[in-house]
Amino acid sequence: MPALFRRLLTTLAALLLSSGLALAQSKVTLAVGGGACLCYLPTMLAKQLGEFEKAGVDVEVVDFKGGSESLKAVIGGSADVVSGYFDHCVNLAAKGQHLQAFVVYDRFPGLALVVSPKHAAEIKSVKDLVNKKVGVSAPGSSTDFFLKYLLSKNGVDPNSVGVIGVGLGATAVAAMEQGQIDAAVMLDPAVTVLAGRNQGLTILSDTRTQKDTLAVFGGEYPGGALYTKAEWIAGHEKEVQAMTNAIVATLKWIQSHTPEEIADKMPPEYVGKDKAGYIAALKNTLPMYSETGRMDPKGAAAVLAVFSQSSPEVAKANIDLSKTYTNKYVDAANKKMGMK
């Protein structure tokens, strides 16, 4: 009897789906490491445009101070998916944790190592950061990874630098202007806001454009992506495809609209009181966004190469990069929308 009952339920569910009566959307909790940051704009804009709902998935966005905290939410089970930087997938693969990115929205990381205006006289290069305090969004986040990579690349022991979590937005700008920290790894709109208020701002390293990214990493370096545990993807393919469809549709929307039109769609608290400054930062950031959502295998290899330089654990791990991302859902989304 129980087996027969289960078969009847399965048949009934299939009939409801095929008849269009089962319209309740799947619920997904999406953790973001600082939603106001322009590096995450495609995710937040997809929510504002209603693209997730159009694709058939009910997404609840939970905003955290940094990428490491949003990652902890997924690892701990309080969130389903992360909107954050792909490099976490590579880093955790070395620790035996299988995370996979399924749509990439940033072609470049957009990270900049900026000197506090109050400490510009004493800091002229990365080497000058020895025994200094440097801000990151949160310890263990991609901003922290970037800092450690630059320090190692310039012959500076990462342990000789004090790392302080200052967030990504107004808190980071305030900490820099008040001289609470000597430098910080920042992203837009914070970088553009700080530069607008402080003429001649010293930027030691900048990855907001393709040219600068190539100079720093030797190749394109994917930044923001939607990623989660590989087993969650395998068990929730419908939701994963819907979220991918929403992000790809949003990327297409970004390409066909002006910075002013994009800014008008964003929450007022993200744009802030200086809308002109936000739009200026957005203009600087637009080249960073992907047009297709696909992961470039060379970009994934660049991430691995960077981590291998600064982390002996990653270098020794013999990571299979093909397991850290998939283009399956992006390709299906692009095909559906008639994009290559």
Image (cartoon, helix red, strand yellow):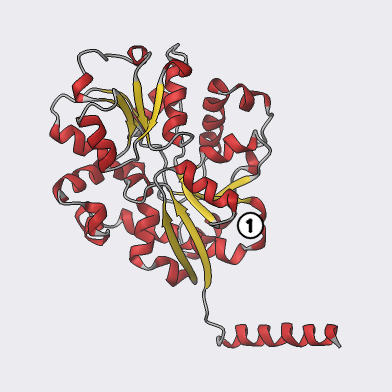
Image quarter hosting the N terminus:
bottom right
Q: Residue at x 23, y 22 (%)?
A: 202
Q: Residue at x 17, y 44 (%)?
A: 277
Asked which secondary structure carries label 1, the reply is helix
Q: In the displayed structure, would residue 50 be above or below residue 280?
A: below
Q: Residue at x 69, y 29 (%)?
A: 318
Left or right of 15 on screen, residue 134:
left
Q: Quadrant of residue 265?
A: bottom left
The kind of residue tagged 1 is Trp
Q: Which residue is mark 1?
A: 232
Q: Residue furthest right?
A: 1
Number of numbered discs visible in the structure rendering: 1
Q: Quadrant of residue 324?
A: top right
Left or right of 48 on screen, residue 199:
left
Judging depth in this view, the residue of 194 and 221 nearest the camera is 194
Give the x, y percent position of residue 83.
46, 50
Q: Mark 1: give few (<14), some (14-19) or many (20+) Cα within 10 Å.
A: some
Q: Is residue 52 visible?
A: yes
Give the x, y percent position of residue 96.
68, 38
Give the x, y percent position of residue 161.
41, 19
Q: Is residue 191 visible?
A: no
Judging depth in this view, the residue of 203 and 332 nearest the camera is 203
Q: Residue at x 19, y 55 (%)?
A: 260
Give the x, y percent position of residue 10.
73, 82
Left or right of 30 on screen, residue 121:
left
Judging depth in this view, the residue of 60 and 101 nearest the camera is 60
Q: Quadrant of residue 124?
A: top left
